Structure formats: C-alpha cells, structure tokens
Image (spheres, rainbow, N blue to C red):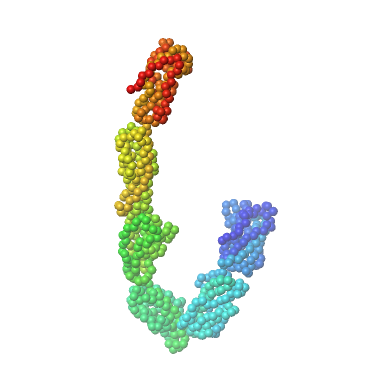
Amino acid sequence: MALLRPPVLLLALVVSELHGLPWFINVSESQGPGAILYSFPINCTSYVPTLELLSVQPPTTFFNPPSLNRQQKTYMAMVTLSSSARLDALAVNHYRLQLRLTCGKKVLEAPLSVNVHRDPGYSPCAGQFANPGGEIIQVREMVTPGAQLYTLLLPGLQLQRAQLSINSAQDPPYFPGPFSINGQGWLLAPSQGLKGHAPKVFPLEVLVSFGQNQSCHRMLKVKVLPDPSSQISFLGQAPNVTILEDLAPGSNVVQVRARGLDVRYEILSPVPCPLFSIGREDGVVRTTAPLELAPAGGVAVTRLQVKAYERRRPWASADLDVTVNVRSVNRWPPRCLPAMLVTEIPETTPVGTVLKTFTCTDPDSAGSPLDYELQFHSPPGPASLCLRGRALEVPSPTYRPMCWVLQDMKVNATLDCDTPGACFQHAASILVLDGGHPPMTSEVPVLVMVTPVNEFSPACVPRTFRIREDAGPHTLLGSVVGTDKDYPHNSIEYYISGGPTTFSVDRLSGEVHLLGSLDYELQTLYRLTVLVTDHSQDQHPTQRRSGSCTITIEVEDVNDYAPKCQPPFQELTIYAPLGHSVEVTKVSCWVPQEPQRRAFSYSIVGGAFSDDTPARDRRGGFLAAGTLVCGGADCDKCPLSLGSGLALQQALPGVGPDAADTKQISPGSATKQYPGN
C-alpha cells in the first residue's frame, strides 16, 4: 500500500500553534477493509489520551474509530478502513474526517482530508464479488417462467454503461432452459420455468464488461426451493463421497433419503449407469462392476442425478445430485526407461545440452502426471546438472533455482575441470513420484563422468640470461617457466626449436644448461626458441597443444689475453732538471686477439728514484694515460736515472691499434729503443 505520509507529527497539546493544522493523505480506491490510511505518534506522557472520530463528510461508515497503541513513552494512533468500506473515486473522491484528541485537560481538534484517486487496474466489481463462492439467491420452483429473479446492475457501473451476460454453459438436462439478463440488469428465470427442479442449485458465471477493455466475472448461484404444497424432499445436502477403486461389486456407496409417503428412488442420469445402482425402496447407492481406474477411463468422478418420488403420486418428486469420487489404490511404483544412466561427457559440453530423456509411466494409472526430483550425491548440490521434468540437461545458470521443475535433465553450468577436484564425476539420483495413495517412488541412479578436454595452449614468458664466456659445460643459466590453464597445470614439456647445440633445456623442468664452450670475441648474443608442449590433459592422449617463447643469452666478456706494446722495451736517459709534468715517452698497446679493445690502464711496477724521496710518494706522479712524465703534483724533480717497468691492465673494449698514438720524445732527452719480438 503506497500512501503519501506527512512528516511525523508529535501532538504536543501544550503548543497552541498546532490547533487547526490540516492533514492531507491520498489513498487508492483499491484499498480494502482494514487498510491503514494514516498513523502518527501522540506525545501525552502524563495522562491516558483519547482520540475520537467526531464526523465524516460526506457521511459514511467506511472509516473505523481511530485506535491508540502505547509504545514506550508515546502512543501510536491509526486511522483504518471499516469492514464495509468500498472506495469508489467516481462516486466520492474526497472525505473530511474531524478528529478530537484529549490529553488530560487539553483538547485538540484537527481535520484529516482523505483524497481518493482512481486506480486504472481496479475493478468496480471487486467489492461486490468479494465472496469467492459467489452470491446465492433462492427462488421457488413454482416461479413464473421468465420472472425477474435478481438485479445485477452494480453501483457505479451505471455511469460506465456496463454490459452483463451469462458466460457459463446452461446445458440440458440439468438446466430446464437458459437464464437470461435484460437491459436493466435483471436476472430472468428460464422460459420453461423451474417446476420439478427443486432443490437444484444452478451456477451462473456473469460477465460484466465496462469501460475500454475492462471486465470482471461474478458467480451467482440460483437455488430452487421446493413448492410448499409438495410433500417430498430430500433430507440433507447433496452428498459428495469418495470410495477406493478396489471396492467390490455390490458394496454400499451412500444412502439418500427423502421425506414423503411411500417414496421410491431411481437414477435419472447417467443412463445407462454401468457402475452404480440405487435401491428403489432404501435409496442405497451400490457398485455394480469393478472400478479399476487404469482400464476404465472416466470413472474417477461420477455424478449421479437421483430422483425421489411418491409411488402413488409420481409427479410429486424431487431430484438430488450425488457425486462419487473413485480414488485409485497405489500398488506399483513408477517404471522408467532407462532404469539407470551411466554416461561420459566432455567438459566443453555446451550449456543446455540434453543428456538423456527419461520415459516413466505409472502402472496403476496410465497417463497420470508424475513428479521428478534430482538429488545430488557427489558433489552435493546442483553444480552442473539439471533435471527438467524427464530430461537431464545443462541449463543456463539463470534458471538454476528452478532446474528440476520442468521435463529434461541438462548440464546446468560450464563443466570446468581445470580446478583440482572440480568435476570429473557427478553421482545423482532421479526420484520419480506418483500421485497415488500412498505415494510410491522409483529411483533412477545417474552417474555422469566428465572427461577433460585440452582447451588451452601452454605459454611461457621470454627470459634473458647472462653467462661468462669462460663458463664450463653443464652450467645452469636459469629456468624457463611454462604455464597452462588446463589441469593438471604442470604437465608441460620443454624443447629447443632449432638453434645452436651449445645450449640445452631440460624436458621436464625447463632448466637451461650450457653444453659447449663460449667465446665472447666470436659471438656475444644467442636467441633460442623454446617450445612448450602440454600432455595428459585430454581424454585422448594425442590431443596436445604447444606454445613458444624466446630466451636471450648474453655472453659476458672475460679478460683472457695479455696486451702487447710498441715499443716493448725502452731505456731512457733524462737530464735534470726538466720541470714538472714534462712528457718523457709514450707507448702504444693493443690485444691482437681482441682488436676491438683499445682502452687500457697503466701503472709503474718498479724502478729507482732519488735517495731522499720514498718510492710510494714519487711513483704515482710519473705515469698518466700511457705517457711517462717527469714530476707530478707531489714531486718537484726527476731522478737522475730511471729504469722502470710498466704494468699494463686492460680496460673497457675500444677500437683497434690503428687509432693508437705514435711515440713522442720530449727535447732534452736521449732515447734508446729496442724492437719487439
């Protein structure tokens, strides 16, 4: 119920400004009896308050007196609709309720305006047709044929030009003739009259059409009362009995009795009646044949029309309807084909695939509906399979909550076997239940084995390894790590595709090893393509997938050749004093096996200096960038004689010897050179 509720209003009676404040609420005309229209708290802690409904304009009984319920320190007031409420916005769309609140000596009166708005989906018939059993009118069987029996024109429908008609069947012989409705909304008796039809009850379904494509149905029952002058009538209501189908022929079903003189009984319909008979004098209905429901269709419910009449005055009679319900006796459980299901399906089976349709029948009642239930054993729960009535299927996850309501057993969701223990096998049972008494059940075992499918290709990440050129065989460079989404995830083999035989990869672990020798001067970089191939991930061993990645191996240089210098030996004579930082000589060095190297570092490893200067203080100032100089930052003169050895250390690789500078000899010195070897 959607109401427009105003903000919470605490009725503090000591606040005079609240006096006369109007309240407005909107309600739909579809609100029925007992509906809460408005509720609000009342703050009256020192006294017991009272709330009264003083008046309603326009006058009506649609509103109950307001109620008060205590909730802790406050009271909650409610205004509700009464049991006679029938709101109709076309008739009255506004009510004004005058309320009076008393709290001790304080009194406050305030109006409450109720606006009733139209509800397009609301039928004006709802209030008049509230009784699901329909209204019952009683007429005498001696009523004049075609007489006006009842008015059907409902309040409010006159404005909508409603049309009324009888929509239900009125077939003989039960109906003496059709009832009808005239233009003024009067129900008219059949033109044949109702004589001899007491105490029948004629059900009539009345169709009321109004507005644009709006209609409703109303049930009306016409009960025919016997004429007071007639001396015969049945005792009690029309019997409705239930018997079992294994009742033996000649067994009593029910006894009917009528009031009258020398009464006799007979069955008017059906004629002939092969299954039942009635005693002419005692009115006992008995079986006359076996009541097997399976071979004899249509005997589940039999309606007998019994007539009671006076033997001396046959025209003085009365009719009675007797309903006999034959209930089946459940002897056999349902039978299903196949009686069990064992099957294999790949994990890539599409959602919605029907795995098997079961055919089940009830031997006790051929064609009777059966109920099917799917119970999971392993794993517990409807993870991947679904039963739709009689078929096992793979339904969409959208319909998982209703997966065994219909008729098939299908796959319920993607059968993913790429997680350990995710599927592989589903054990379940289909329970087939009949509707007999007592109910009997059959169980169909189901075993669905899900086989893995190699869905994904393995992959590996490119890697870069570094290794010294002097590394020995079988040196471990690192590992190639392959991944595969299929389960088991580590079922991968590694191979090198083509390339040099200098390296190898372990087939199982992916470790890369050195097999041969390396020479930085011949090759500094290797690129190898590693193939990763999966295995044991499919039902068929030959179904394998491959992937690849490139690994890069960088060879690190090792200083394994001594440089040569030109000239290889020099003997120099220096005349002092020459001053500071005077160039004495220069040498040119290179490595024949590594012509690209040109950067070197130099140091003096021996020689004689003057007696008054320690060698550790003087030696560092004599050599710079391959040039022997006299003096330095920490010395002020050169030795009188020098016989030194130069120690040469290789630096970073450079260009060839052609770029080396030629020997230079400073003035004022004499040099002897010795050719190299």
**Residue 337, above or below 9:** below
Q: For the N terminus, give its image quadrant.
A: bottom right
Q: For the C terminus, give its image quadrant.
A: top left
Task: Residue at 33% x, 34% y: name it.
Answer: 518
**Residue 220, above or below 608:** below
Residue 227 seen anywhere in this rendered image of the structure:
no
User: Where does residue 628 sit, x and y in percent of width and height?
Assistant: 43, 19
Seen in the image, is 222 located left or right of residue 420? right
Residue 318 seen anywhere in this rendered image of the structure:
yes
Residue closer to the observer: 99 or 373:
373
User: Where does residue 443 sit, x and y in percent of width and height?
Assistant: 33, 62
Task: Residue at 38% x, 27% y: name it.
Answer: 590
**Residue 571, above or below 322:** above
All told, the count of numbered labels is 0
Seen in the image, is 398 located left or right of residue 329? right
**Residue 290, above or below 515:** below
Q: Quadrant of residue 21?
A: bottom right
Residue closer to the observer: 102 or 147:
147
User: Where does residue 155 sit, x and y in percent of width and height?
Assistant: 60, 72
User: Where does residue 372 sit, x and y in percent of width and height?
Assistant: 37, 64
Furthest residue to the top?
A: 611
Task: Residue at 42% x, 59% y: name it.
Answer: 396
